Structures are given as structure tokens and as C-alpha cells.
Amino acid sequence: MSVKGMVIVLAVILCATSVQGFPMFKGGRCLCIGPGVKAVKVADIEKATIIYPSNNCNKIEVIITLKAHKGQRCLNPKSKQANIIIKKIKRMNFLKYQDV
């Protein structure tokens, strides 16, 4: 193997080892793309899920599952309806672990 070939192989190895530590996506892997909707009809909500910031995504995500197989919607976590849902879920989780 020539010197030029060894230099290229060494450069590729160095680049591969340095790139391995960088995150692939700057924003992480958030489930919600964009800010989300401001409100959803309460009658259409089947389930609400809150995903808190983590290593994968650095923002709070409120995911609403709709009835009748209409899919899921991302709710804007800064909206009034999202704040109400977050408070209710926190309250339900708090009461679930109390010895009442």
C-alpha cells in the first residue's frame, strides 16, 4: 500500500471516530414537528399523553389521541387547553401515589 493510500485510510478512520460522538439531529427526535394545534374538541379526546424533555427532545410534548381512529394531534404546550390538560394529568398522577 502506498503512503498516499495509508494517509487516506488514516484520515477516514479519524473522521469516523470524531463524527461518532456528534448528535445526528440538533433538535433531537421529537414526536411533534412544529408548534402543534392550539385546541382540540374535548369530546374527541380519547387519551392525552405528556412527554417531558429528555435527551431525545428538549421540549414538552402534549400528544392527544382522538376517538374513532382519527389519529393523534400534537397540542401546543403553551396553549390554554394544553396547560389545563398538563395540570389534570399531574394531579391524577399525584393522587395515584397517595395513601388516601
Image: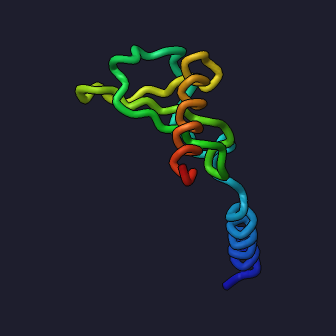
Left or right, 37 with respect to 66, comes to right
Residue at x-position 74% and y-position 75%: 10
Residue 40 found in image quarter: top left
**Foreground pick, 92 / 63:** 92
Residue 82 found in image quarter: top right
What is the number of callouts on the image?
Answer: 0
| Residue 23 placement (x, y as % from top left) | 68, 53
Direction bottom: furthest residue: 1
**Foreground pick, 27 / 21:** 27
Determine whether 63 is above or below 26 in the image. above
Residue at x-position 54% and y-position 15%: 38
| Residue 93 placement (x, y as % from top left) | 54, 44
Residue 83 found in image quarter: top right
Direction front: furthest residue: 100
Determine whether 14 is above or below 96 in the image. below
| Residue 30 placement (x, y as % from top left) | 56, 40
Left or right, 5 with respect to 67, comes to right
